[in-house]
Structure formats: C-alpha cells, structure tokens
Image (spheres, rainbow, N blue to C red):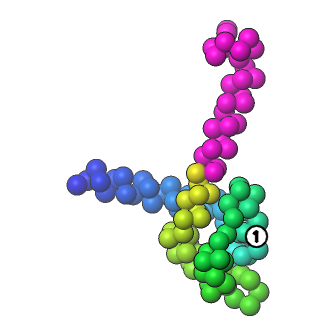
Amino acid sequence: MAAVSHLKNKREAKLREGIERIMARCGSGGGAISVKSYIEVMSSYGIDMDDKEAAKLDRLSDNDGMIERPDFIEYAKKSHVIKDYMDAEKSKNVDKAELAFKAIDKDGSGFIDV
C-alpha cells in the first residue's frame, strides 16, 4: 500500500512541477496567468486548444483574460493539455540529448571515443 501511495505522490509532484514551469513560461510571477500567454506557450509546443478547453479557460478568466493562480492550478490538474505539454517537453529534452551525443560522437560509431 505504501508503494502505491509513493507512486501517486511522485506523479503529483511531477504534475505540480510541470504546472509551475508553465506558469513561469507564461510570466505569471507567481500570481495570475494570462489565458493568451498560456495558449501561446502551449502552441509553441505544438499543442492546440480544442473548443472545450477554450470554454473552460473562458469560464475561469476574469474580464482581463487572467486566471488566478489557485483556479489555474485546479484546472491544470484535470487538463489533458498539461499532460500533453509535459510529454512534449520530455520529447524536446530527449532530442537535445541526442544532438549533444551526436556532437561528441565524432566518427558516428554510436560510441564516444576518449
């Protein structure tokens, strides 16, 4: 039972980290998040909002298009968009690692010569 709890806590921690990264990329500074910035960040990762997600964001935002931090966090915990973002971010990191390895693997053998 403790192992299941540990895995759940680990997933929740990763989700919280992903949410915090998104908020930082949107320039929230720890406060409210701009819906426009959020959509732009997601779009830069190739993630488009469907009408259902856009409607959720509209309901959460105030007249200035801002969503308060606690409201955004609750939305993000349930949104598939956040999970898509985290998958895309992980994929970008793998691509960077592969490029770095190829730069070091001078002869293309798949090994790093010392």
Give the residue displayed 71% in from the left and 56% down from the top.
46
| Residue extending furthest toward the top | 114
Front residue of 30/49: it is 49
Residue 38's spot in the image, x, y percent?
71, 69
| Residue extending furthest toward the bottom | 63
Residue 110's spot in the image, x, y percent?
64, 16
Q: Tell me which secondary structure the magenta stretch mostly adopts.
A: helix
- Which quadrant would residue 67 be assigned to in this image? bottom right
Q: Which residue is mark 1?
A: 37
Q: Secondary structure at mark 1?
A: helix
Q: In the picture, which quadrant includes the C terminus? A: top right
Give the residue displayed 59% in from the left and 58% down from the top.
84
Residue 93's spot in the image, x, y percent?
65, 41
Q: Which residues are magenta?
A: 88-114
Give the residue displayed 34% in from the left and 53% down from the top.
6
Question: Would you say residue 105 sits in the magenta stretch?
Answer: yes
The kind of residue tagged 1 is Ser
Residue 52's spot in the image, x, y percent?
60, 77
- Which quadrant would residue 95 be assigned to in this image? top right
Front residue of 89/30: it is 89
